[in-house]
C-alpha cells in the first residue's frame, strides 16, 4: 500500500524542487520512491526552473566543480609526506615453505566519519549515542585486533603474506549535501578528511606487523561529492578522491604498501587470479534487498569479474549468483543508524567483511567482523 503524502511533505517537496533538486535527489532526501516523487510533482503542478535559471545553475555548478578540482590537486601536490611520521614496523610472522599460500581480503566501507547517531534506548529509557568520533576510533581498533587475531589463527594452516584492502567509499560523511545534515555531524568535511588520513594511514601501516605485502585499492562513494546535486561529476571532484591520493602519496616510497586510486567510480582488481569488481553501490536503487537481477545485468553489460565487493546499503551479507558471481555486500560502522531505520525499517549493525582466497577458489574462509563492544 502506497504511503500517503502529508501536507508537511508536500511543503518540503515544493521547497526542494524550488532549490532545483532533481527527482532522484529528492527521493533520497525524503526516503520515497522516485516514481512517487515524480507523480507528486506533476499532481501539484510544481513548476520547474526556466531554461535561463537552469543555465545559470549549471554554470555555477561547473565553476564550483572546477574550483574544487583545482584546489584538491594543489592540496595533493603540495602535501609533504614527512608530515606524517610512521613508526618502523617489522613483521612478527614466520612463513613456512610447506604451507599453502592464501591471500587475505578486507573490505572497508561506510565509515561515515563525522556522524553523530542517537537512538532511544528502551532498556535505559533515554536517548543514547551509538556513533561518534570516539566510537569510530574504538571500532577501528577492534577491526585491527580482529584482523590480527584471525591472521594468527589461520597462520597455523596457511601462509598469509599478502593483504588486499578494498576501500569502497563513504569514508567521509560530508557536511553540505543533505538539508539539515549539519545537526547530525560533529566536524566539517575538511576535518573529516584529515582525521581519516591520520587514522587510515596508521591502520594500513600497522598491518605490516603480520603481512609482507599490502595492496590498497580505493573507490569513491556518494557522500564525498562536492555538490548537493546527485549528478555525474568528475571523480577528481570528490573529497574522498583527495583523501585517497594523500594516503597514496604517504606510502609512495614504502616497498611493502601499494595504494591504487583509479579516476573511475568502479574498478577491477585481480586477486590470486580472481577478478573483483570494486564499487560503492549507489548506482543501484532501492534497499539492496535483492541484488541478483541488478548484478546479473551488470555482469551482462560489463563482464570480466567473478567477485563484487560493494557497500552503500549498510547491510553486511554475502550472496552467490548462480555459479559465476560472489557478492560481498559490506556493512556500515554506525550501530542502529537512525537514517537507515527510517528509510529501510531495519537497524544497522557495524560489520565488515574479512575473507581469504587461493588460486582455485575465490573465497576459502570468511568472517564478518563485528565492530561493536563485546
Image (spheres, grey):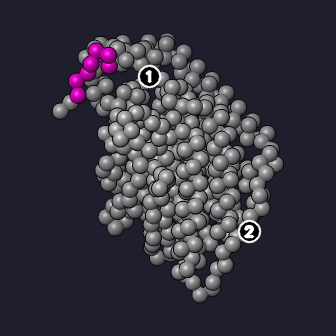
Question: Circle 1 is placed at which residue position?
Answer: 21
Question: Circle 2 is placed at which residue position?
Answer: 90
Residue 72, percent across and down?
Answer: 69, 35
For label 1, the crowd category at 10 Å Cα-Cα, with few meaning under 14, some 14 to 19 and many 20 or more, is: some
Q: Residue at x 30, y 32 (%)?
A: 33
Query: Looking at the image, can residue 60 be seen?
Result: yes
Q: Secondary structure at mark 2?
A: loop
Query: Looking at the image, can residue 339 be seen?
Result: no
Residue 190, percent across and down?
Answer: 65, 33
Q: Quadrant of the N terminus?
A: top left
Side (left or right) of 127 relative to 35: right
Q: Residue at x 59, y 25 (%)?
A: 62
Q: Is residue 41 above or below residue 372?
A: above
Outermost residue on the front side: it is 124
Residue 120, magenta (yes or no) = no
Q: Residue at x 43, y 58 (%)?
A: 328
Residue 221, percent across and down?
Answer: 52, 42
Tell which tag, 2 or 1, sits nearer the viewer: 2
For label 2, the crowd category at 10 Å Cα-Cα, with few meaning under 14, some 14 to 19 and many 20 or more, is: few
Q: Which residues are magenta?
A: 3-10
Residue 119, percent across and down?
Answer: 41, 35
Which of the 4 quarters of the picture holds residue 34? top left
Q: Nearer the viewer, residue 187 or 374?
A: 374
Side (left or right) of 186 relative to 259: left
- The answer to whether mark 2 and mark 1 are in CB contact below 8 A is no
Q: Spatial distance from mark 2 to mark 1, Cα to Cα?
A: 52 Å
Q: Residue at x 67, y 60 (%)?
A: 206
Q: Earlier in the sequence, mark 2 or mark 1?
A: 1
In the rendered structure, find residue 175 and report the number of the disc placed on it: none
Side (left or right) of 38 relative to 126: left
Amino acid at each position: 500500500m502506497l504511503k500517503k503524502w502529508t501536507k508537511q511533505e508536500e511543503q518540503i517537496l515544493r521547497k526542494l524542487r524550488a532549490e532545483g533538486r532533481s527527482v532522484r535527489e529528492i527521493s533520497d532526501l525524503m526516503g520515497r520512491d522516485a516514481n512517487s516523487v515524480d507523480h507528486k510533482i506533476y499532481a501539484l503542478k510544481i513548476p520547474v526552473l526556466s531554461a535561463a535559471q537552469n543555465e545559470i545553475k549549471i554554470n555555477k555548478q561547473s565553476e564550483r566543480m572546477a574550483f574544487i578540482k583545482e584546489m584538491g590537486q594543489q592540496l595533493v601536490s603540495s602535501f609533504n609526506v614527512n608530515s606524517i611520521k610512521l613508526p618502523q614496523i617489522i613483521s612478527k610472522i614466520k612463513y613456512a615453505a610447506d604451507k599453502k599460500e592464501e591471500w587475505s581480503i578486507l573490505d572497508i566501507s561506510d565509515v561515515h566519519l563525522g556522524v553523530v547517531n542517537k537512538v532511544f534506548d528502551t532498556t535505559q529509557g533515554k536517548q543514547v549515542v551509538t556513533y561518534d568520533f570516539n566510537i569510530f576510533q574504538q571500532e577501528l581498533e577492534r577491526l585491527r585486533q580482529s584482523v590480527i587475531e584471525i591472521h594468527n589463527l589461520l597462520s597455523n594452516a596457511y601462509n598469509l603474506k599478502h593483504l588486499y584492502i578494498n576501500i569502497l567509499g563513504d569514508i567521509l560523511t560530508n557536511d553540505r549535501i543533505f538539508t539539515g545534515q549539519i545537526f547530525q555531524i560533529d566536524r566539517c568535511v575538511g576535518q573529516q578528511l584529515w582525521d581519516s588520513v591520520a587514522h587510515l594511514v596508521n591502520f594500513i601501516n600497522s598491518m605490516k606487523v603480520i603481512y609482507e605485502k599490502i595492496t590498497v585499492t580505493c573507490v569513491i562513494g556518494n557522500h564525498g561529492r562536492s555538490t548537493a546535486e546527485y549528478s555525474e561529476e568528475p571523480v577528481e571532484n570528490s573529497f574522498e578522491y583527495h583523501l585517497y591520493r594523500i594516503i597514496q602519496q604517504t606510502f609512495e616510497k614504502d616497498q611493502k604498501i601499494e595504494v591504487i586510486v583509479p579516476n573511475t567510480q568502479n574498478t577491477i582488481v585481480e586477486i590470486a587470479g580472481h577478478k573483483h569488481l570494486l564499487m560503492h553501490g549507489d548506482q543501484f536503487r532501492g534497499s539492496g534487498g535483492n541484488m541478483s537481477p541488478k548484478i546479473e545485468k551488470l555482469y551482462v553489460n560489463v563482464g570480466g569479474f567473478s567477485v563484487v565487493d560493494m557497500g552503500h546499503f549498510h547491510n553486511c551479507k554475502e550472496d552467490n549468483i548462480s555459479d559465476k558471481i560472489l557478492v560481498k555486500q559490506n556493512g556500515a560502522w554506525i550501530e542502529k543508524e537512525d537514517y537507515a531505520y527510517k528509510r529501510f525499517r531495519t537497524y544497522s549493525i557495524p560489520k565488515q567483511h574479512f575473507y581469504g582466497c587461493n588460486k582455485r577458489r575465490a573465497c576459502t574462509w570468511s568472517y564478518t567482523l563485528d565492530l561493536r563492544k563485546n
